Image (tube, coloured by chain):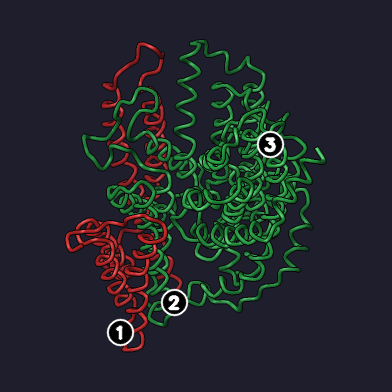
Chain colours: A red, B green
Amino acid sequence: MSPRDSSSTARSTDRASAIAHIALNGILALFFIYLFVRAGSLPESAWEPLGAGTFPRLILGLLILLNLALVAKEVPRIASSASLPDGLIRQWLWNHRLALGVLALFGTYTLTVPLLGFRLASFLFLMLVQGLLGARRPRALLIALVIALLFSVGIHALFQNVFSISLPRGMFD
Amino acid sequence: MLDALLSGASQLFTLGTILTMLVGVVAGVIAAAIPGFTITMAIVLTLPLTFAMPPLQGVATMLAVYVGGYTGGMISAALLGIPGTPSAVATTFDAYPMARNGQPGRALAIGIWASFFGALISTVVLIIAAPPLALIAVKLGAWEYFSLIIFAMTVVASLVGKSMLKGLMTGCLGLLIATVGTDPMMGEPRFSFDLQLLANGFPFLVVLIGVFAVSQLLQEVEDADQIKQGKQLISANVNFRPMDAMRETIARPLNLIRSSLVGVFIGAVPGAGGSIANLLAYDQAKRASKNPDSFGTGTPEGVVASESGNSATSGGGLIPMIALGIPGSAVDAVLMASLMVHGVGVGPRLILDHGDIVYGMFMAMMLAAGMVLVVCLFSMRWFLRVTEVPRSIIVPVVLVCCVIGAFALNNRATDIYLLLCVGIVGYLLSKLDYPLAPLVLGVILGPIAETNLRRALMSNEDWTLFFTRPISLALLILALISIILALRYRFKANKRKLSQT
C-alpha cells in the first residue's frame, strides 16, 4: 500500500469513527431527554426535599450536555476527513465475523439457559463456540467434548451437590 | 491482654485450625480468580461449613477465605484482563498490559507481594488503631458520606484515558445505570418500564462482568488469523521470579504504605470497601508518581498500588466490626454472623469479653496473609499455565463462568439477560474507545451518593451543612484539590504534546 493509500484509509476510518460517535451520542441524547421528561413524573415525598426523580434528572441533565458536547466535537472531523469507501461496513463485519459469531452464540445461550437448562445449553454453547473458533479435527473435537462436559455437567453437579445451589433446570430436567 | 493473646494463640495454632485455614486460603484464591465469583459468595458458602467448628477456628477459616480472595482476584485481572472480583478492577490497568508485554509472571509475582504487604500493614494498623479509627468512621454522617463519594468520584479523572469528555460520559452513564430499579428511599420503581427484567435494577456484579469480561473476551476473538493458528491469550516465555518481584515491590515503600493506608481507611468506612479502595489507591499512586504517563502501560507502580490497596481493606473492614460491632461490608456481616452463631456477642465489649477471639483474629489475619503468600508463590506456576490455553477454549469457558456468576448472585434468570445487554453495550463502547472503568465506578458510587444526599437533606434541608461540618468540608476541599491537580496535569500534558509536534 502506498503512503497516499494508507493516508486515505486513515482519513476514511476517521470519518467512520466520527459518524459512529455522532450516531451513538445523538441517539443517547434523545433517549436521555425522554428519560429526563419521564423522571419528572416520578413521585415526590412529603418527608424529604428531593423526590425519587431529582438525582436521576441531575445525572440525565449532565449526560445530555456531555452527549451534545461529544457530537459538537466530532462534527468538524467529518468535514476534514475523506468520504467513506464502498463496502466499508461489509469489510468491518467480515473482519469482526468471529467476535460477532461468538456474540450471537452467547446471546442465544443466555436466552435459552432458562428454557433448555444450564447443562444442555452450556454443553451446546461450549461445543459450538469451540467449533466456530477452530476445533474441527478429531483430536480437537475430543478435547472440546471433554471441556464441554466438564463445564456443563461437571459444574452443574459441583453446584448442586457441594454448594447446594441449583442452576437453571429447563424443560428437559 | 497477655492472657487473652496466649489463649488466642493456643486456640489458633492447632493442626485442625491451620489445616482448615489452608483449605480456606486455597478456596478463596480459586473462587476469586474465576470471573463472576466474588469473595462475598465464597464467604457465604463457607459459613455453614464452620458451624461445627469452635468459634475461633470458624472465624479464622473465613478470614483465610477473605484474605485469599483479595489476592485471587488479581489472577484473572493480570492474565485475562478481567477482574476476578470488583476489588481487582484497577489491577487490570497495569498488570494486564505487563502480561501482554510478555511478563505475566512478573505481573502476578508483584501483585502477590503487594497483596501480602497490604494485608500485613492493614493488620498492624488494625491492632494499633482499631478503637480511634472506628470512632472517626462512625462519626461520618450522611453529609460526610456524600462528600467522601464526591472525593472518590474525582478518581474518574485518572481513569478517563485520552478523552475527558468520554470518561465523564461513561462515569455518568454508570451513575444512571445505578438509578434503574427501585428507588433507595421511597421504594418507587424507576426506569423499569414495567419490565420484570429491569424491576430489580442492574446488580453491580452483572455490570462488572458484562462490561469487563464479555467485551474483553469478544475482543480476544476478533483476529481470525490468530485464532486459526491456535494462538494463546498471552504469547510469552513464562518466567516467574518471586524474589526479584519482592525486591521490586519493597523498592516502592511510599507507594505500598500510602496505598495500604488508603485501603485501611476505605475499608474502615462502612459501605465503602475494596471495590473503591483499589481505584482510589491507584489514583493516588498515579498522581504522586514522577512518571504518571507510564500508568496504564504496564508499570509495577500501578500493580503495587491496586493490590496493596485492595488487600488492606480486609484489615480495615474489621475495625468497625471489632471496635463497635458495626459490619463495614457484606463480608464483615457474614463474619459477625459466624461469631454470633457460636454465642459470641459482637459489639463494643467484644474486645473486653472475648479478648482471646479478637487477638486470635488479629493473628489469624497475619497467618492467612503468610499462607496466601506461600500458597500463591508455590501454585502460581500452575496458574500461569492459563496463558498456554488456546483462546478457542478459554473464551467459551470464561463466558459460561460469567453466566454462572450472574445467575448464582440472586438465583434470577433475568440477571443473565442483563449480562448479555451490558456485555453488548460494553463491547460497543470499547470499540469506540470509551473508557469502561469510570462506568463501573459510577455504578458503585451512584447508590451511596444518592442515598446519603437524600438522607442528609431529609434530616436537615440546609445545604450549607455540607460546607460547615468539618470532616465534610475537609473531604470537599480534598475533592477540589484533586480536580485542580488533574486539570493541571492534563493541561501540562497537552502543552507538552503540542510542543513535541
- As measured in the structure, the alpha-carbon distance from the residue carrying label 1 to the one carrying label 3 is 63 Å
Labels 3 & 2 near each other (Cβ < 8 A): no
Nearest the eye: A43 or A32: A43
Residue at 42 percent across and 70 percent down: it is B394
Residue corresponding to mark 2? B390
Q: Circle 2 — which element?
A: loop
Q: Say if residue B157 shows up in the picture.
A: no
Q: In the displayed image of the protein, which residue is found farthest to the left?
A: A171
Residue corresponding to mark 3? B354
N-term mark: 3 or 2: 3
Q: Amino acid at mark 1?
A: Arg
Q: Position of residue B258 (x, y in %)?
A: 72, 44
Q: Chain for mark 2?
A: B
Q: Chain for mark 1?
A: A
Q: Position of residue B79 (x, y in %)?
A: 54, 66
- As measured in the structure, the alpha-carbon distance from the residue carrying label 3 to the one carrying label 2 is 52 Å
Q: Position of residue B452 (x, y in %)?
A: 49, 24
Residue at 42 percent across and 67 percent down: it is B220
Q: Quadrant of the N terminus of chain B?
A: top right
Q: Amino acid at mark 3?
A: His
Q: Say if residue B443 shows up in the picture.
A: yes
Nearest the eye: B468 or B402: B402
Q: Amino acid at mark 2?
A: Pro
Q: Are marks 1 and 2 on the same chain?
A: no
Left or right: residue B491 compared with residue A99: right
Q: Chain for mark 3?
A: B
Q: Residues within 10 Å of mark 3 (few under 14, many from 20)?
A: some
Residue corresponding to mark 1? A136
Labels 1 & 2 near each other (Cβ < 8 A): no
Q: Quadrant of residue B427?
A: bottom left
Left or right: residue B130 compared with residue B194: right
Q: Is residue A3 above or below residue A43?
A: below
